[in-house]
Image (cartoon, helix red, strand yellow):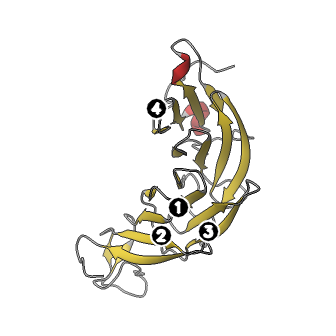
């Protein structure tokens, strides 16, 4: 059964909606001492129907499950970000379902080196048809492709602190991904700068990376858009 609302549940911290406006998903990352949960409502059922409640297999304090969510256009694929735990990596959980009936199908693990801090929840994104998924934290960005059998496989991304925790969004066809770099450092000629090796690096100037998919489903960054130094 769905529990009564709790103090500091933060329901609505993240929201996602199907293309037809009927399936609504929203996160409550503060629920149960920041363990978090996600609720899915079928608005076509009318009022008075409780939403489905989704959560981690083990509800871990501090996981903040549901701080970021996304839905496919048909409202049948859902992705949820969760903070890293004793296993060491941040990850996302993918659900498939319809209306109020959902089941977990994939755990998408971000490949972190170094690891993000405990409690940091990765950003997540799905393409409109649910065939591509992305997960990104302070260090790495990982992109996945859904195979004909239904499972997701890793197909590329950015690593070694090349990604810096900003928003993620796919184009309509899922073959282009925008990745915000709002937490990164930058030099005049780029955004990948280490304060240890470059004392002139500017802290958090921000940029947007454009990544494009090749025919074999691998990815590469094709352009970098910067507000303060717009020349690529």
Q: Residue furthest bottom?
A: 197
| Precedes in sequence: disc 2 or disc 1 | 1
Whole-number angstrom distance, CA of label 4 to CA of label 3? 35 Å
Q: Which residue is mark 4?
A: 21
Between 99 and 118, which is closer to the camera in this rendering? 99
Q: Quadrant of residue 214?
A: bottom right
Whole-number angstrom distance, CA of label 2 to CA of label 1? 7 Å
Quick check: marks 2 and 1 in contact, CB under 8 Å? yes
Categorize mark 3 by other alpha carbons within 10 Å: few (<14), some (14-19), many (20+).
many
Please provide percent x and percent y for residue 106: 72, 51
Q: Secondary structure at mark 2?
A: loop
State left or right for residue 101 relative to residue 47.
Answer: right
Please provide percent x and percent y for residue 67: 51, 43
Q: Which residue is mark 1?
A: 137
Measuring 54% from the left and 55% from the top, which residue is drawn there? 122
Quick check: marks 4 and 1 in contact, CB under 8 Å? no
Between 176 and 11, which is closer to the camera in this rendering? 176
Between 218 and 228, which is closer to the camera in this rendering? 218
Whole-number angstrom distance, CA of label 2 to CA of label 3? 11 Å
Please state which of the two labelled residues, at mark 2 or mark 4, is closer to the viewer. 4
Please state which of the two labelled residues, at mark 4 or mark 3, is closer to the viewer. 4
| Precedes in sequence: disc 4 or disc 3 | 4
Please provide percent x and percent y for residue 101: 69, 29
Q: Secondary structure at mark 1?
A: loop
| Precedes in sequence: disc 2 or disc 3 | 3
In this rendering, the answer to whether 73 lies above or below 225 is above
Q: Which mark is residue 163?
A: 2
């Amino acid at each position: 059964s769905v529990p009564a609302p709790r103090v500091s549940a933060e329901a609505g911290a993240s929201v996602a909606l199907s293309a037809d406006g009927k399936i609504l998903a929203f996160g409550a990352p503060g629920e149960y001492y920041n363990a978090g949960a996600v609720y899915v409502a079928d608005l076509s059922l009318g009022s008075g129907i409780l939403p489905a409640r989704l959560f981690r297999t083990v509800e871990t304090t501090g996981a903040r499950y549901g701080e970021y969510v996304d839905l496919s256009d048909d409202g049948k694929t859902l992705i949820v970000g969760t903070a890293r735990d004793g296993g060491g990596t941040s990850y996302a959980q993918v659900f498939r379902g319809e209306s109020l009936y959902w089941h977990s199908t994939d755990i998408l693990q971000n490949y972190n080196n170094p690891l993000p801090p405990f409690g940091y929840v990765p950003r997540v994104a799905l393409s409109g048809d649910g065939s591509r998924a992305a997960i990104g934290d302070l260090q790495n960005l990982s992109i996945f492709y859904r195979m004909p059998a239904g499972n997701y496989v890793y197909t590329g991304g950015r690593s070694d602190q090349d990604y810096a925790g900003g928003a993620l969004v796919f184009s309509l066809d899922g073959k282009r991904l925008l990745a915000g770099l709002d937490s990164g450092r930058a030099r005049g000629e780029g955004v990948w700068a280490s304060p240890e090796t470059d004392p002139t690096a500017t802290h958090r100037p921000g940029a947007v990376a454009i990544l494009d998919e090749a025919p074999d489903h691998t990815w590469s960054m094709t352009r970098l858009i910067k507000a303060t130094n717009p020349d690529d």
